């Protein structure tokens, strides 16, 4: 299954400033698969080391962190030769060995010609708990669930993907093609972007039942991870937050409220749990902004936020939404108070633009779903699940901050409506790169 991150991996390999690479991403988004596929295609030799499966590896990093000594001992243990430039050394599940994480600094300083990619199911959590990690000594990339464009490629509709990615005007798309894309988008929002789910779906005659079964197994495996990798008391709280997210998103006001988890709960009771889920890549917190100015991060309200899941398909599974209800007619675009569509749009933006995303409110009068800073410009995006033409909140934002290009993402066709650009939902991944005047 081809992934867009392949291009970034190729750029990393060719870079003169290349450092050991840490590939981050939630469990089961395909990190190991893409690293091995990349290694097979672009390196003469590959040495794959899994710190969870091979416990002998721990001892190789206990004596000292001399990169040359570690390389020698790995070669002796595995009876192989690690060649600079032509061998890719893969450290998988590296979070199981803290000294191995720290050793990346010494590989960068003393063995820069050795190509290393490190990954792990919960390496983000480990990095969040690690003090003194050598900042500046490694490169980072993030792998997300497949976005809609990648999904099109996975189901053999690369023709549609190529067509969408080459759109350079705001002229409406042919209505028949528009309808076909909305139909496929419904499939994607149900299936989501987890590689195992997509494989089940496409290899079993596009079975929604088998896709849902795979989703529920992934959700269950995450809960088991809470118990495996967190302290018992923390694992209980992490599970409470995780299981409560669909209920929070089902509210008219989707602001995350701790007392919804448990009566009397306060932020400090679940601060660690939220951070753990965020570091693991499972959730996306979106903080509130009411005063818009650059940089946006300086004006975020850390106490008011929403939480979305990293995959819209898993959200639907956790809500036990019936596939036939979701896929029949326009029910998908109106169910669950629009949360599925908001989650989908956020997921699309995150997959190609790794920058903080916020939402805007104005004294209870208006709310714009997403707000981001890109190339010194603030871009607001209002998301509508259906074909509503109401723009009250976006107009109010534009009146207050006239320098910001206004955009909507709806089930309507591509169009420039006055000063507002309407992205069809299946083009959410293009926001805001194309910008006004070019789409």
Image: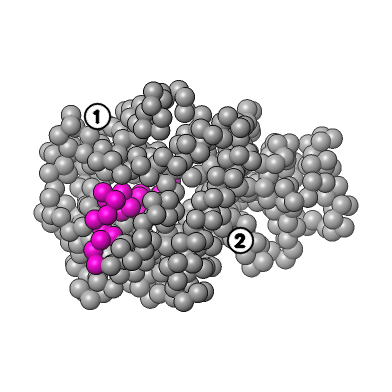
Asked if residue 345 lies in the magenta stretch, the reply is yes
Instruction: Choose top left, top right, bottom left or bottom right for residue 224.
Output: top right
Task: Tell me the residue at 38%/45% (across/down).
Answer: 246
Residue sitting nearer the eye, 270 or 260: 260
Instruction: Tell me where the magenta segment starts and ends, as one range.
Output: 329-354
Q: Which mark is residue 291?
A: 1
Task: Tell me the residue at 42%/46% (across/down).
Answer: 309
Depicted 204 relative to depicted 11: above or below: below
Instruction: Choose top left, top right, bottom left or bottom right for residue 293.
Output: top left
Query: Which numbered disc flags the more N-terminal residue, 2 or 1?
Result: 2
Depicted 364 relative to depicted 203: above or below: above
Residue 70, image x and y in percent?
81, 44
Residue 269, image x and y in percent?
47, 24
Quarter of the image with the C terminus is bottom left
Residue sitting nearer the eye, 244 or 410: 244
Q: Which mark is residue 76?
A: none
Q: Which mark is residue 33?
A: 2
* Disc 2 to disc 1, C-alpha distance: 43 Å
Depicted 35 relative to depicted 309: above or below: below
Task: Tell me the residue at 58%/37% (across/down).
Answer: 125
How many other residues sit within 10 Å of disc 1, few (<14), some (14-19) or many (≥20)? some
Left/right placement of residue 88 relative to residue 34 reads right
Q: Taking the image as drawn, is residue 428 in sight?
A: yes
């Amino acid at each position: 299954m081809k992934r867009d991150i392949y291009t970034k991996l190729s750029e990393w390999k060719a870079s003169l400033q290349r450092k050991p690479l840490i590939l981050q991403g939630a469990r089961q988004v395909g990190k190991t698969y893409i690293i091995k596929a990349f290694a097979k295609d672009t390196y003469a030799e590959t040495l794959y080391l899994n710190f969870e499966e091979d416990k002998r590896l721990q001892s190789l990093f206990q004596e000292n962190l001399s990169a040359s000594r570690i390389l020698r001992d790995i070669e002796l243990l595995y009876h192989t030769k690690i060649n600079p430039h032509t061998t890719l050394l893969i450290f998988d599940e590296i979070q199981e060995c803290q000294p191995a994480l720290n050793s990346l600094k010494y590989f960068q300083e003393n063995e820069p010609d050795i190509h290393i990619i490190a990954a792990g199911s919960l390496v983000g959590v480990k990095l969040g708990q690690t003090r003194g990690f050598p900042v500046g000594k490694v490169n980072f990339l993030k792998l997300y669930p497949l976005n809609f464009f990648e999904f099109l490629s996975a189901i053999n509709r690369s023709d549609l993907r190529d067509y969408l990615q080459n759109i350079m005007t705001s002229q409406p798309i042919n209505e028949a093609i528009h309808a076909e894309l909305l139909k496929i988008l419904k499939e994607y929002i149900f299936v989501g972007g987890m590689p195992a789910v997509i494989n089940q779906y496409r290899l079993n005659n596009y079975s929604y039942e088998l896709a849902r079964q795979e989703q529920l197994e992934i959700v269950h495996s995450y809960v088991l991870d809470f118990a495996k990798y967190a302290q018992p008391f923390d694992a209980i709280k992490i599970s409470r937050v995780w299981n409560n997210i669909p209920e929070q998103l089902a509210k008219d006001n989707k602001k995350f409220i701790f007392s919804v988890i448990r009566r009397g709960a306060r932020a400090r009771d679940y601060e660690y749990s939220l951070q753990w889920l965020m570091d693991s890549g499972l959730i996306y917190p979106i903080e509130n902004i009411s005063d818009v100015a650059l940089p946006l991060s300086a004006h975020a309200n850390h106490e008011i936020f929403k939480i979305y899941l990293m995959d819209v398909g898993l959200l639907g599974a956790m809500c036990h939404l019936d596939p036939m209800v979701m896929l029949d007619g326009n029910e998908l675009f109106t169910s669950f108070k629009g949360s599925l569509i908001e989650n989908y749009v956020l997921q699309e933006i995150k997959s190609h633009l790794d920058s903080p995303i916020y939402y805007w409110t104005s004294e209870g009068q208006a709310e714009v779903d997403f707000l981001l800073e890109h190339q010194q410009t603030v871009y607001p995006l209002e998301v509508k699940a259906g074909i509503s033409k109401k723009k009250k909140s976006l107009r109010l934002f534009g009146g207050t901050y006239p320098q910001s290009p206004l955009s909507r993402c709806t089930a309507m066709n591509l169009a420039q409506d006055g000063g507002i650009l309407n992205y069809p939902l299946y083009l959410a991944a293009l926001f805001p790169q194309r910008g006004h005047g070019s789409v």
